[in-house]
Amino acid sequence: GQQLNQSPQSMFIQEGEDVSMNCTSSSIFNTWLWYKQDPGEGPVLLIALYKAGELTSNGRLTAQFGTTRKDSFLNISASIPSDVGIYFCAAGTYKYIFGTGTRLKVLA
Amino acid sequence: EADIYQTPRYLVIGTGKKITLECSQTMGHDKMYWYQQDPGMELHLIHYSYGVNSTEKGDLSSESTVSRIRTEHFPLTLESARPSHTSQYLCASSETPPGTGVYEQYFGPGTRLTVT
């Protein structure tokens, strides 16, 4: 079946550093979504991407919808301790499949 | 955005019991979903609904069942709980921002189910 490969699986960074993560697939998708999930909570939608090549920002977060429609990238600038959590990509149209997650830990 | 409510937040129950996990949303979204997630792992779609009286099974096989009698309510039922059902269950609904043709999916806080 369809699968999203998300990398890195986990990362430790220093506060203030920039973070990059990506999601790739062998299938073409019309929409990419990026979520953050804190322990014991539901995922929170960060950014939605609608068009191939689109670059969208939400505060310190920037995400891009790959031109091939098979990948997406999320960047976090100047990380802070509250950025800790698991970041998931999701791709689809009205139904979504989810990536395996990137676990982010920020060292103060 | 959407206000999505799930109850209970935590449930510990014995094997063989029947349980219903509640999910409600107040935004009138047509599409609703149930996902199953083991701690820290990816989400797997187990059920979805396009609207009232419309339900479909998701990509991950599940022994649970769902119903959609009202737009705002999408409960999930397990007739006989087993330890293998221990997991987090997340409910979501989606809306299409005007002019996008895209479905943005919003999640509730989840129900952590433990079957002993």
Image (cartoon, coloured by chain):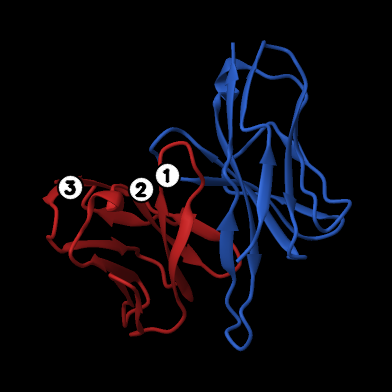
- The mark found on residue B62 in the picture is none
Q: Is residue A71 above or below residue B19?
A: below
C-beta proximity under 8 Å, tags 2 and 1 = yes
Residue shown at the point (64%, 62%) measured from the top left: B2
Q: Which chain is blue?
A: B
Front residue of B95 and B86: B95
- The mark found on residue B42 in the picture is 1
Whole-percent x and y of residue B101?
A: 61, 82
Residue shown at the point (77%, 41%) measured from the top left: B75
**In the rendered image, which residue does mark 2 sit on?**
A100
**Mark 2 and mark 3: Cα distance apart in space:** 14 Å
Whole-percent x and y of residue B24?
A: 74, 49
Front residue of A83 and B63: A83
Q: Residues within 10 Å of mark 3 (few under 14, many from 20)?
A: some
Q: Is residue B85 above or below residue B104?
A: above
**Label 1 amino acid?**
Glu
Whole-percent x and y of residue A5?
A: 31, 55
Q: Are marks 2 and 1 on the same chain?
A: no
- The mark found on residue A11 in the picture is 3
Q: Are marks 3 and 1 on the same chain?
A: no
Label 1 marks a residue whose chain is B
Left or right: residue B4 compared with residue A99: right
Under circle 2, the secondary element is loop
Q: Say which of marks 2 and 3 sits in front.
A: 3
Left or right: residue A97 compared with residue B60: left
Whole-percent x and y of residue A81?
A: 24, 49
Under circle 3, the secondary element is strand
Residue shown at the point (35%, 71%) measured from the top left: A70
